Amino acid sequence: MVTIYVFEAKIVKTMRKYLIYPPKQYQEKLSKLHGKKIKVIVIEESE
């Protein structure tokens, strides 16, 4: 089974890491994936 979530996110820098910060409506859905391996595709659009 494959589940795909498509959303715009912010890149947030903490002390040592860069984190992808999803919008609030996706945070609960993504929290269910805690501890699992996932694949992430990052697309940067330039103007």
Image: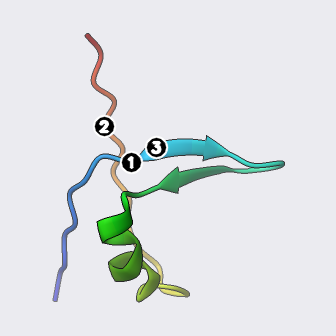
Where residue 1 appears, as percent x and y from the top left, is 16, 89
Q: Earlier in the sequence, mark 3 or mark 2?
A: 3
Front label number (3 vs 2): 3
Residue carrying label 1? 9
Q: Earlier in the sequence, mark 1 or mark 2?
A: 1
State the residue lying farthest toward the top: 47
Front label number (1 vs 2): 1
Q: Is residue 42 left or right of residue 5?
A: right
Residue carrying label 3? 10
Amino acid at pointer 1: Ala
Q: Which mark is residue 22?
A: none
Are discs 1 and 3 less than 8 Å apart at CB? Answer: yes
Residue carrying label 2? 43
Q: Between 12 and 3, which is closer to the camera in this rendering?
A: 12
Q: Is residue 31 left or right of residue 23?
A: right
Q: Gap between marks 1 and 3, in whole Å? A: 4 Å
Q: Gap between marks 1 and 2, in whole Å? A: 11 Å
Amino acid at pointer 2: Ile
Residue at 30% x, 46% y is: 8
Amino acid at pointer 3: Lys
Q: Which of the 4 image quarters holds residue 38?
A: bottom left
Where residue 28 appears, as percent x and y from the top left, is 39, 80
Q: Gap between marks 3 and 2, in whole Å? A: 12 Å
Where residue 34 appears, as percent x and y from the top left, is 51, 85
